[in-house]
Amino acid sequence: MISPRIPIAKEGYPFFGSAILITLILAIFGYKFLTVVALVVTFFILYFFRDPERFIPRQSNSFISPADGKVIVIEKVFDDRFFHEYVHKISIFMNIFNVHVNRIPHNGVVEKIIYTPGQFYSADSSQGGLRNENCATIITGETGRKIAVVQIAGLIARRIVCWLEPEDNVRQGDRFGLIRFGSRVDLYIPGSVQLSVKKGELVRAGETILGQFVV
């Protein structure tokens, strides 16, 4: 059996290194209270950028969660932004205590990436979903059906990171980016998918199955 390990996302290295350096300087100069504060901040940064291994279901007909967090929206809507058809929209809110590394929900090929500048409303608000800065990744699945994964910045989150490029082949569960510090991911999947998640549920990136095609 392979034991899971808990690495750190590479985007966290500069923050973690700076925090350690500041903590050491404060300790050397004898600022005990500030050293404790800096140490707490250092551990928080380490915790925030954690990137644990996940046990991916690897079911080609399923869609797994792209993010850790709470499902705040599930609705069937006519999407006039990406596909111009009825789709399931699932919104997952990540607070600052969730793992923030995002994962691919379904096997396929990256068709395009659309970055849209915007505002910084609270990510769990309706305004946040409509007007906030976001980065949408359009993936064409193995069956030819398309999905969209939209990383959305929040009130505190001001940095969206996407490691993908057009024409990348992606597998279910692959890491593809993250958002700093507290944010939201919206997933648009075909309306024919049978959902297996409900509003209010807590989900885990790369592990929780959100729905699947009915065979």
Image: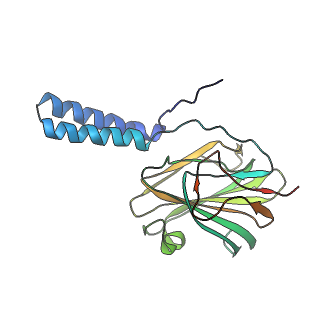
In front of the other: 92 or 180: 92
Residue furthest out toward the top: 1
Left or right relative to 178: residue 37: left
Residue drawn where x is 31% and y is 38% of the image:
42
Compared with 126, 9 (above or below) is above
Q: Position of residue 214 (x, y in %)?
A: 85, 58
Q: Residue furthest left?
A: 30
Point out the image quarter for the N terminus. top right
Residue placed farthest to the right in the image? 215
Q: Is residue 211 above or below residue 171?
A: below
- The x and y percentages for residue 8 are 47, 35
Asked whether 201 or 194 is in front, the reply is 201
Quarter-of-image position of residue 57: top right
Residue at 51%, 39% (x, y): give it: 51
Residue sitting at x 73%, y 69%: 87
Q: Position of residue 3 (x, y in %)?
A: 59, 26
